[in-house]
Image (cartoon, grey):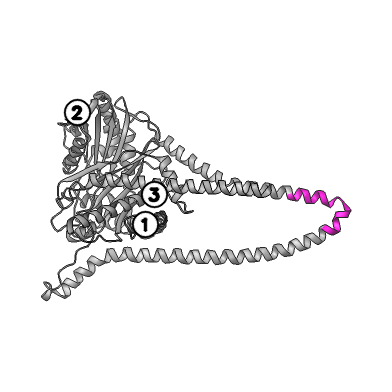
Amino acid sequence: MDTIELNLPRELGQHLTGMDNMFFQLEHPRRLMTICSVWLFTKRLDINIIFEALENLCAHYPRFCMVPKHGTLYETPIWSRPYQDWTFKDNFILHTLQGASTDCLQKYMAQEYAKSFDFEKPLWEVHYITGLQDGHTAFLWKAHHSMSDGIGIMKAVLATTTSFDPVEVTKQQLEQLQRRRSEGNIANHWHDFVLERQRQQRKKNDRHPRHRTHQQQQQRYEKAMHKVGVLWHQVIFWFLWTWQLLVMVTQQVYHELWTMSLLVEPLLQQLRHLILFPIRRLFSQRKPTREMFYDDDQTFDKLIAWTDDIHLTDIQKVQKGLGGGTKCTLNDVMLMVFARSVRRYIQQHQQSSNNIKPSSNVSLRIIIPLSFRFPTDYAMKNVVTGNMVGLNTGAADNISPTTTTTLLKQVHQRMMTVKRSILPYAMYHVFIQTILRYFPFLMMPMWMQHWYTDIPHAIFTNIFGPTNPTLFGGQEMTGFHVLPPQAGKGSISVGLVSYCNKVNISMLTDNHPDYPDLANVLCKVFVDEFKSVLAEASEKLDNDTSGCSDSDEDNGAHVN
């Protein structure tokens, strides 16, 4: 533990930042600010290697051996030492499941997730879980969001593995980005090569007098046509550029106003109550209305489930087949499938519970975390905020390929609008990191916290995991799942994570009788929806390929 003592002064005595303190103050027994990850293995782990890894974790990341204390109305808490005899082993729990199935593992995880941290100890826990079928084991990580954002925590715990190098992973990501950029420049290099060959040919022709007169006339004609062509191209270019800019600005302004309306509405509601206090019973406070909402208090009990791994090649096939010419990302595809899954579940639930015609169009509000980190920044800190994306999920149960393409295009456009938004940047740097850092008493009251957390249907986060097989505790990791904190009642916590060229979705929901087994049902619906989308993409690619082949054959027959 000497190495831990040497590293403690770097963080000891420092105040929590505004963002750290916001997550610390947002903690509520019914919606915990807990980031969770589980690693799966086919064999038992070596306890000694685990303890050595945890000791190194505390030595290199001091927040794993400190607690926030001594907060006041005018000062954020200070990173302090825990109780005197604390060791990292106090945060280690060994558990043997009573059942050997994955369902038992998920129930145990949900049970532990719902437990608040002991604020006298560092705000993290690890659970070594045995008793799974065929000797499989699991390793559960829990950490409070006030310690760091999801990227910082995941990179820190992954640094305990024996085959994960954050610097090397970043280098690989930068190389992939550079490779994509260089591939995009091949056409430009070929164009320059063709122009150079043409210039050389013109110089060669100039040496022959018989070509000179004809060539001068040809050059004058080409120059005149070139000027006309350049002028026409400029007119078209500026028209399209102006139109695209107008559309983009319109979408951006609409998004900013829509987001601001969500932020201002509870204040207007409170003002209305103050003005109409004598007749407030006639003007009761309106609650955010959305699907999967219920009137009771948010449940303490939670549900956790996840999907099987999905190959990146299948997602790339969807991007190519249904992207519609847009540069849609992996995140866009998975968010589109998730939106379809929620819509399908809501329609089925409405039909079964109310015996009424289900809504043809379900509008979703989903929080997207936005990181302000540099690519090589792996420090334990909160450099994240979020923005809301609104999605209209369609107008029919059986989605045609055209509608799927339209939905994917909508998701991509609105995600780009979210990323361009200046509101998260302003909220992070101006309000949270400055005002809440030095005036923590300005934190919103509890009724307003309930309002804001009840607005979104889900929180959807994306974490990039290791690209190569990773070892921990002497064994290779075979599964990797991540869960962000949950918002208000009825909302869904969604974690998208990649590992070894595969991705999976994990979900956490409330355990409420109105929506039984919600997490597991949503995961099953997600798998079905992805298979349907993949089939549509494959069919479209096959049709495009066969169409090109038929066209080539027709051209060949015509030439002959």
Binning the other alpha carbons within 10 Å of mark 1 as few (below 14), some (14 to 19) or many (20 upward) gives: some
Q: Are the residues at dot 2 and dot 3 in contact (C-beta closer than 8 Å)?
A: no
Residue 131 disc label: 2
Q: Is 514 drawn above or below residue 104 in the view shown?
A: below
Binning the other alpha carbons within 10 Å of mark 3 as few (below 14), some (14 to 19) or many (20 upward) gives: many
Quadrant housing residue 359: bottom left
Can see residue 318?
yes
| Residue at (42% x, 37% y) in the render | 169
Which quarter of the image is occupied by the N terminus?
top left
Q: What span is in magenta?
A: 198-214
Distance from Cα at disc 1 to Cα at disc 2? 46 Å
Residue found at the very far right of the displayed protein: 209
The amino acid beneath tag 3 is Val
Marks 1 and 2, the one that precedes in the sequence: 2
Marks 1 and 3, the one that precedes in the sequence: 3
Q: Which residue is mark 3?
A: 333
Q: Which residue is mark 1?
A: 425
